[in-house]
Each structure stands twice: as C-alpha cells, then as structure tokens.
Amino acid sequence: MNPIIETLTGMDGLSDQVVAMDLLISAKSGIRNYAMAVTESGTPEIKEMLTRHLVEALDMHEQISVYMVEKGWNHAWDTNEQISLDLDNINTALNLPTL
C-alpha cells in the first residue's frame, strides 16, 4: 500500500502486521501438509525428503513467530494482550474510510 494512503487511513504499520500474519498462517498450513505427507509417503527416500522440508517449514514458522513477538504483533503466551491487540485491529479496520 502507498505510504501516504497508509498514514491517512491509519493503516501505517498494520499492513506489515497483516502480511506477517498471512505468512505465519501459510507456514502453519505447510507444516500440517508436510506432516501428513510424511505419514503417507511410499518410499524411504520420499519420506526423508518430506521430513527435511517439514523441519525447514518448522524453522521458518519459528522465525516468523519470533519476528512477530519482537514487533508486538503476536502475544501467544498472553491471551488478554492478544485479545486487546485483535480488538484494536478490528476497530482500525472498521474505521477505515470507504471509497
């Protein structure tokens, strides 16, 4: 999004948070898919390759999670804080000007 429009709409910073959350959700989905594929693999070679990809996906998930925690966008261990952040984000979205 254009930085000027982000500032005018109050979305500055929120766009990065949305992208990071989408990436985290995608990483989680990939982890589930790799885990299922490992259990369904037919040969040891395929199982080994899928397991390697699963470990890489887990590493990526951890990196994204740490990044989001450092930015204050994810409070996995503090439910009240996460709910407060989610409510703030909802209010920001509801107050966006309509075109």
Image (tube, rainbow, N blue to C red):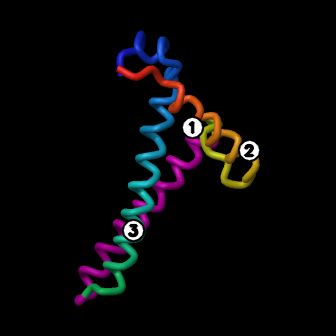
Which residue lies most toward the bottom here? Answer: 42
What residue appears at the point 66 percent right and 39 percent down from the top-left corner? Answer: 85
Task: Tell me the crowding category of disc 3: few under 14, some 14 to 19, or many 20 or more residues within 10 angstroms, Cα based.
Answer: many
Would you place residue 71 above or below residue 35 in this image? above
Secondary structure, magenta segment, majority class? helix
Q: Which residue is mark 1?
A: 90
Circle number at residue 54: 3
Residue drawn at (64%, 40%), measured in percent from left and top? 87
Residue 93 horizontal/vertical position (percent): 51, 32
Quadrant of the drawing holding the N terminus? top left
Identify which residue is drawn at 46% across, 31% down: 16
Name the disc covering residue 81, or none. 2
42 sits left or right of 23 in the view: left
Give x and y (percent) for residue 91: 59, 32
**CB atoms of marks 3 and 1 within 8 Å:** no
Q: Which mark is residue 66?
A: none
Q: Amino acid at mark 3?
A: Leu
Q: Secondary structure at mark 2?
A: helix
User: Residues under labels 3 and 2: Cα distance?
Assistant: 30 Å
Q: As shown in the figure, which amino acid type bears the numbered disc 2?
A: Glu
Q: In this picture, which residue range is highlighted in magenta?
A: 42-69
Q: Earlier in the sequence, mark 3 or mark 2?
A: 3
> Which amino acid type corresponds to the residue marked 1 in the rendered image?
Ile
